[in-house]
Image (cartoon, grey):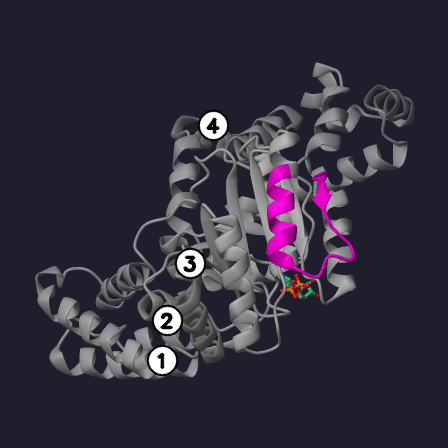
């Protein structure tokens, strides 16, 4: 993947004390190759790496820093720049806001329309209306109806009407009469760019006079995505791009090239088939993602906010004396919870985001554990050893969990205590060192 290749390229610089012309040139060449392999156009890759080279050589004052790190930072910042630098918000100020969705068949238009409706309803407190404009594929209309039902947004359809521009006009009138302040027009696409489709979408565009026209493109189609983006832009002069299917094994090249080729911001990325799998596009985070850095900076910041040195020392002593109890455990849980939701946190760990994205992590993962601990008496929390069968039954009842759940927690807790104690020994510390290097 692009990530691995860039990693390798940047590795060249590791171990070198200074950034020299020679090792920068080598690294830059490898970065360029990695980008081209990931479907970034040659021209864009070349311009990009030229900029990176200039910046790298211009910053030799920073030789105290690890050159590999510095180079990674330069590549990261240049990438974010290439993708527009800052986040570009959707304009939803008009009442009603009219959003036209365009793109090829199969790009993910209908799915995105549903997601956008959901996003505007739940995150922006809007009252959206979805409009089914694909008059050629009855299945597309049904699909939109299903999605609308799923997210609780009504879908305007006119079965039998073969003129998308007329449907659009009627939908506008309907929306006004029914107090919808956002209207999302899903349109028909074809398998490839053709003049009929372009004429039709242009007509719908003229009938709707959209606040925002969004072009939806499948990021898995690589260089084709860029060509399609250009063809649609020539006809529609759209306001923003939506990259879909970024959850698969995509190479990320499209995100890097599109902005340069059409000079339109990427506004959203779609990362799955679920209605919630939609993110506002942040160039910085995308650069992180491509470079596989995860959002380590925010993770460290959040951890630091919660870290209390005195408390850490106190805990260390307790662990050494085998006195780590359920009260300490509760404190730890609360500390983790204050850092944010579990899935977000895990996603910030480099390399972990991808591995974990399909796993449904319960935000309330600790809820049951906490309930059980809160049902223990203070003495039990300090001395888990005294929890016998009758105490277990009482705790289970109080927490609404089964005796089996209580048993499991006690067992895990005891194992955790042993593990923590082991980590404190010199043997444990050595093991941690070996794992870390
Ligand atoms: P349309 O023809 O442009 O309306 O495309 P659809 O919305 O019907 O999407 C085509 C296929 O891609 C469907 O099977 C969707 O479930 C799937 N799809 C859409 N967006 C995503 C995405 O972000 N990730 C993944 N994995 N699949 C997607």
Sooner in the amino-acid sequence: mark 4 or mark 3:
3
Task: Indicate whether 260 appears above or below 12.
Answer: above
User: What residue would you read off at disc 3?
Assistant: 238
Q: How far apart are the two marked residues, 3 and 1, measured between alpha carbons?
A: 22 Å
Sooner in the amino-acid sequence: mark 2 or mark 3:
3
**Residue 134 lies in the magenta stretch:** no
Q: How far apart are the two marked residues, 4 and 1, measured between alpha carbons?
A: 56 Å
Q: Secondary structure at mark 4?
A: helix
Can you tell which quarter of the image residue 31 is in? bottom left
The label on residue 314 is 4
Say how many tags the image has. 4
Q: Percent x, y for residue 245?
A: 58, 65
**Marks 2,1: beta carbons within 8 A:** yes
- Tell whether 317 sits left or right of 164: left
Q: Percent x, y for residue 402?
A: 89, 32
Question: Which quadrant of the frame does ligand 1 lie within?
Answer: bottom right
Q: How far apart are the two marked residues, 2 and 4, measured between alpha carbons?
A: 52 Å
Give the quarter of the figure containing the C terminus: bottom left
Query: In the image, what residue occupies the spot 78% across and 50% down?
Result: 146
User: What residue would you read off at disc 1?
Assistant: 41
Q: Percent x, y for residue 82?
A: 30, 64
Q: How far apart are the two marked residues, 2 and 3, measured between alpha carbons?
A: 17 Å
- Tell whether 366 sits left or right of 91: right
Front one among 247 and 159: 159
Q: Secondary structure at mark 2?
A: helix
Of badges 3 and 1, nearer the viewer stands 3
User: What residue would you read off at disc 2?
Assistant: 257
- Residue 292 visible? The answer is no
- Residue 346 visible? The answer is yes
Using a 10 Å C-alpha cutoff, classify the residue at mark 4 as few (fewer than 14 neighbours), some (14 to 19) or many (20 or more).
few
């Amino acid at each position: 993947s692009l990530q691995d290749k860039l990693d390798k390229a940047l590795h060249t610089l590791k171990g070198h004390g200074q950034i020299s012309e020679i090792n920068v040139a080598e690294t830059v060449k490898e970065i360029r190759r990695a980008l081209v392999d990931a479907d970034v156009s040659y021209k864009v890759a070349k311009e990009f790496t030229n900029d990176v080279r200039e910046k790298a050589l211009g910053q030799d004052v920073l030789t105290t820093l690890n050159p590999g790190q510095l180079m990674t930072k330069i590549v990261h910042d240049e990438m974010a720049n290439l993708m527009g630098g800052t986040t570009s918000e959707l304009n939803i100020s008009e009442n009603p806001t009219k959003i036209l969705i365009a793109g090829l068949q199969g790009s993910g238009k209908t799915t995105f329309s549903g997601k956008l409706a959901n996003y505007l309803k739940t995150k922006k407190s809007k009252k959206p209306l979805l409009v089914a404009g694909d008059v050629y594929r009855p299945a597309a209309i049904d699909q939109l109806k299903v999605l609308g039902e799923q997210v609780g947004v009504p879908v305007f359809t006119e079965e039998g009407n073969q003129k998308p521009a007329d449907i659009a006009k009627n939908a506008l009138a309907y929306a006004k009469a029914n107090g919808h302040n956002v209207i999302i027009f899903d349109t028909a696409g074809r398998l490839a760019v053709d003049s009929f489709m372009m004429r039709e979408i242009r007509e719908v565009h003229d009938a709707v006079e959209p606040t925002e026209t969004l072009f939806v493109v499948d990021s898995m189609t690589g260089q084709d995505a860029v060509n399609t983006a250009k063809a649609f832009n020539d006809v529609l002069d759209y306001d923003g791009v939506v990259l879909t299917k970024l959850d698969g094994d995509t190479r990320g090249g499209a995100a890097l090239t599109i902005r340069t080729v059409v000079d339109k911001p990427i506004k959203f990325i779609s990362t799955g088939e679920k209605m919630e799998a939609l993110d506002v596009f942040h160039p910085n985070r995308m650069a992180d993602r491509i470079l596989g850095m995860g959002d380590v900076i925010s993770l460290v910041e959040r951890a630091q906010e919660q870290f209390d040195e005195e408390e850490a020392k106190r805990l260390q002593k307790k662990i050494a004396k085998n006195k780590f109890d359920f009260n300490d455990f509760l404190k730890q849980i609360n500390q983790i919870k204050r850092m944010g939701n579990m899935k977000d946190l895990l996603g910030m760990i480099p390399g972990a985001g991808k591995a974990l994205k399909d796993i449904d992590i319960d935000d309330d993962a600790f809820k049951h554990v906490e309930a059980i601990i809160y049902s223990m008496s203070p003495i039990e929390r300090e001395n888990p050893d005294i929890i016998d069968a009758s105490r277990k039954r009482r705790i289970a009842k109080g927490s609404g969990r089964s005796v089996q759940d209580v048993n499991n927690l006690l067992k895990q807790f005891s194992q955790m205590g042993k593990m923590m104690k082991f980590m404190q020994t010199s043997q444990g510390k050595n093991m941690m060192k070996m794992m870390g290097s």
